[in-house]
Image (tube, helix red, strand yellow):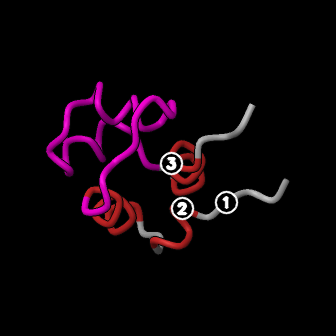
């Protein structure tokens, strides 16, 4: 199973999902869906997400080596 990049970065940075959801003004359900690869943030949301957790856009969307 492929690891979700958002969940991985949150864990590495020690940031809670509900904290980021609140800062981004999205529901916890929406953010949870991003973390489970059910839906994805749009480009502006991804940029804001990267800024909040302190990573670059490249780090946020980096594809894992297979």
Majority secondary structure in the magenta region: helix
Q: Measured from the top left, where is residue 52 in percent x and y?
A: 32, 62
* Image marks 3 and 2: residues in contact by CB distance under 8 Å: no
What numbered label is drawn on residue 61? Answer: 2
Identify the residue position indicated by label 1 in the image: 63
In the picture, residue 26 is in which quadrant?
top left
Give the magenta-colored segment's residue range: 15-44
Residue at coordinates 51% horizontally, 34% vertically from top-left? 37
Identify the residue position indicated by label 3 in the image: 6
Give neighbour class at mark 3: few <14, some 14-19, many 20+ (Cα, 10 Å): many
* Residue placed furthest toward the top: 29
Task: Point out the image quarter for the N terminus.
Answer: top right
Question: In front: 53, or 61?
Answer: 61
Question: In front: 6, or 40?
Answer: 40
Say what secondary structure mark 2 lies in.
Answer: helix
Q: Measured from the top left, where is residue 5 in percent x and y?
A: 58, 50
Say what secondary structure mark 1 lies in.
Answer: loop
Alpha carbon of mark 2 to alpha carbon of mark 1: how far?
A: 6 Å
* Image marks 2 and 1: residues in contact by CB distance under 8 Å: yes
Give neighbour class at mark 1: few <14, some 14-19, many 20+ (Cα, 10 Å): few
């Amino acid at each position: 199973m492929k690891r979700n990049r958002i969940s991985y970065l949150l864990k590495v940075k020690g940031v809670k999902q509900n904290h980021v959801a609140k800062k981004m003004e999205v529901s916890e359900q929406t953010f949870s869906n991003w973390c489970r690869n059910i839906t994805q943030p749009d480009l502006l949301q991804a940029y804001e997400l990267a800024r909040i957790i302190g990573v670059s856009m490249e780090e946020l969307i980096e594809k894992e080596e297979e």
